[in-house]
Every structure is written in structure tokens, then in C-alpha cells.
């Protein structure tokens, strides 16, 4: 029975596959096998080799330029991130407000940017600047409650206290020509670290000892040299009336005279509404010719800002 079923009941599909395999074997035996090692290649001539070499050199140079451009773009991306990660949308308005507030740019007569004489500098210092350092009465004459330490705009708070420091040149720091010796009694050169005055004096720039009860004024004539400060320093400490009286006394004692070359005012503010710190430097350069050149710097700093990408 097994022989009968195997012979008469075979699967036709199996017989067809076997026939195909046999045909394939016959075809393979008739087809010659060519080894790749026996194939013959055409050799390149000198021109083709030179062209191939030039193409390869151009390709190497191209990838070198692409890598250089890529590294430069990465550098710009890191620089952009570091620069604008500290950006604050309120920084511009904060600086603009403080410029108008301290420089008094809205007035033509008492503006810091238009100071050209020593009297104008004292006028701006005693009135505009000093009065803005302390919070005063509101528009309805109400006292400024809970605003201790704030400046007069009542939105920015002083960090520490404001200071003003002076850099001076030594007496007789330059020589007078013999032809005009009878016209001038002294000559004071431009400021440099070689002719900087570093001695300490008594009030009114004298060497003899003077009895003065106000230590703030006495320290203003003492030279200080620390890591942060250098020069003759006066600190704006105390109430507004006390500050005004001290400045009046400093003016009477000729704290700013012909040897004064640089006056620098420094103060730091914090605005709780915008969470911005602002470092302010107001500088006045006293020229040997008698003029004054003013400079100002307002640097906003944010320690809590985050990088925000806006798409428009």
C-alpha cells in the first residue's frame, strides 16, 4: 500500500519544484564561472590620474571648509546663548528712566550732560543728584512710609550707599615756560598714574592739623587705596538734610579745586518690580584747560532671567 500511494498519489507541486531544480543545475553546469580576479581593467593614464588627484584635493578642502563653518556656527550659537540668556525685557525702560532721573536731561539748565564748569557741577550735585537719593514726600504731601532706602522715584532701592570719589594730580606736576612764568603761579598736568596725588590732607587741602567734628568730611580729604576704591572718597550716608549740609561744607573747603581731574559717582540699585539690579557710574573729567567732560554708564543686571524664544 505504501508503494502504491507513493507512486500514484504524489504531489504535483513537489514534482514541479524538483523539475525546476534540475533545470537550474543543468543551466549552472553549462554557464562558465568568471572569477573577479581574472577580469581585466583598463589602466588610467597620467591625465586621468592628475584629474583624480585634483578632485580628491578639492574634496578634502571642501570638507575642511565645511567643518570650519560648522565650528564657527557652534561658536556663534554659544555666544548668542551667553549674551541673550541674561536679557530682560524691562532693562531698556529701566535704563531710560534712570538716565532721565539722575542726569536730569529734561532740564537745560541743570542737566548732567551739559555741565561745563565747576559751579555747574556743584549745583547739579547739591540739588538734583542729592535730592534724588532719598525718597521724599508724595505728590499729595504724604510722607514716604515704608520707603527707607529707596531713591526719590520710590521704585528703586539703594544697595549699600552711594559714593563720590576724586582723583587728583600732584602740585606742580608740569613745568611753566620761562616766557610766561610771570603769568602763572602753578601748573597742573593731565591725570596719569605717574602724577597721581596719593597723600592725605586735612580739610581745605592743608598739611597742618585742624580740629573738625565731622568725620565724613575729614575722611573725604584722606587718600584711600583698597581693592574696590581708590582716591578721596565721600560716602552719602545719613538723612537728606545732613547730606546737603556736608556738600555745602565740602564746597566751602574747596574739595574740588584746580588739582581735581576726575570725579566718579557710583551707586547700585535694585528694582523689586522688574527684579533688576542696576550699576550706575557718573564720571566727570576735569580738563587742565578748565572744561568738564561728563560720561555716564547704566548697567542693568538680572540674576533671575530665563532665556525666552519668541516667534513672530
Image: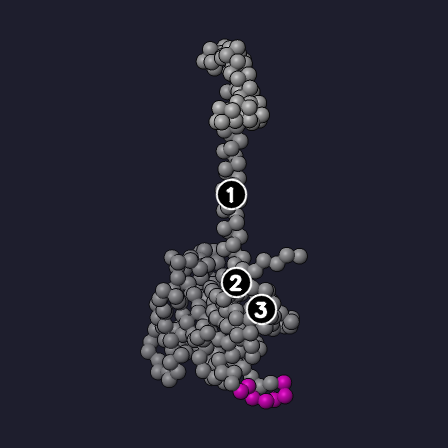
Q: Is residue 293 magenta?
A: no
Marks 3 and 1: which is nearer the front?
A: 1
Name, please, the residue furthest toward the right.
Answer: 312
Q: In this figure, which residue is indicated by the disc labeled 3?
A: 94
x and y percent of residue 104 in the render? 60, 72
Q: Residue at x 60, y 70 (%)?
A: 97
x and y percent of residue 141 in the render? 61, 89
Identify the secondary structure beneath mark 1: helix
Q: Residue at x 55, y 19 (%)?
A: 19
Q: Nearer the viewer, residue 173 or 294?
A: 294
What mark, if any, has residue 306 been given in the picture? Answer: 2
Q: In this figure, which residue is indicated by the disc labeled 1?
A: 72
Q: Earlier in the sequence, mark 3 or mark 1?
A: 1
Q: Earlier in the sequence, mark 2 or mark 1?
A: 1
Q: Nearer the viewer, residue 13 or 119?
A: 13
> How far is disc 3 from disc 2 in space, using C-alphas?
18 Å
**From the image, which quarter does the C terminus lie in?**
bottom right
Question: In the rendered image, which quarter is residue 132 located in?
Answer: bottom right
Q: Nearer the viewer, residue 232 or 101?
A: 101
Task: Classify mark 1: residues with Cα within 10 Å, few (<14), some (14-19) or many (20+).
Answer: few
x and y percent of residue 125 in the render? 53, 74
Identify the secondary structure beneath mark 2: loop
What mark, if any, has residue 281 been given in the picture? Answer: none
Amino acid at each position: 500500500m505504501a508503494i502504491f500511494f507513493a507512486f500514484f498519489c504524489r504531489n504535483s507541486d513537489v514534482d514541479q519544484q524538483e523539475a525546476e531544480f534540475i533545470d537550474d543545475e543543468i543551466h549552472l553546469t553549462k554557464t562558465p564561472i568568471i572569477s573577479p580576479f581574472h577580469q581585466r581593467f583598463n589602466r588610467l593614464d597620467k591625465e586621468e590620474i592628475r584629474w583624480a588627484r585634483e578632485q580628491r584635493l578639492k574634496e578634502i578642502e571642501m570638507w575642511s571648509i565645511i567643518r570650519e563653518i560648522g565650528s564657527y556656527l557652534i561658536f556663534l550659537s554659544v555666544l548668542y546663548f551667553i549674551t541673550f540668556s541674561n536679557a530682560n525685557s524691562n532693562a531698556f525702560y529701566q535704563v531710560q528712566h534712570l538716565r532721565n532721573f539722575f542726569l536730569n536731561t529734561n532740564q537745560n539748565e541743570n542737566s548732567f550732560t551739559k555741565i561745563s564748569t565747576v559751579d555747574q557741577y556743584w549745583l547739579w550735585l547739591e540739588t538734583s543728584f542729592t535730592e534724588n537719593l532719598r525718597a521724599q514726600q508724595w505728590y499729595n504731601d504724604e510722607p514716604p512710609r515704608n520707603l527707607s532706602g529707596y531713591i526719590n522715584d520710590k521704585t528703586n532701592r539703594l544697595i549699600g550707599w552711594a559714593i563720590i570719589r576724586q582723583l587728583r594730580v600732584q602740585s606742580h606736576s608740569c613745568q611753566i615756560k620761562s616766557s610766561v612764568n610771570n603769568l602763572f603761579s602753578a601748573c597742573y598736568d593731565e591725570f596719569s598714574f605717574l602724577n597721581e596725588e596719593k597723600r592725605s590732607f586735612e580739610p581745605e587741602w592743608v598739611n597742618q592739623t585742624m580740629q573738625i567734628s565731622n568725620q565724613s568730611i575729614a575722611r573725604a580729604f584722606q587718600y584711600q587705596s583698597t581693592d574696590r576704591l581708590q582716591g578721596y572718597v565721600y560716602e552719602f550716608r545719613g538723612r537728606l538734610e545732613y547730606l546737603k549740609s556736608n556738600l555745602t561744607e565740602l564746597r566751602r573747603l574747596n574739595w574740588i579745586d584746580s588739582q581735581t581731574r576726575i570725579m566718579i559717582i557710583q551707586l547700585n540699585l535694585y528694582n523689586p518690580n522688574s527684579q533688576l539690579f542696576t550699576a550706575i557710574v557718573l564720571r566727570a573729567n576735569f580738563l587742565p584747560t578748565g572744561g568738564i567732560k561728563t560720561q555716564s554708564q547704566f548697567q542693568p543686571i538680572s540674576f533671575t532671567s530665563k532665556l525666552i524664544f519668541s516667534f513672530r
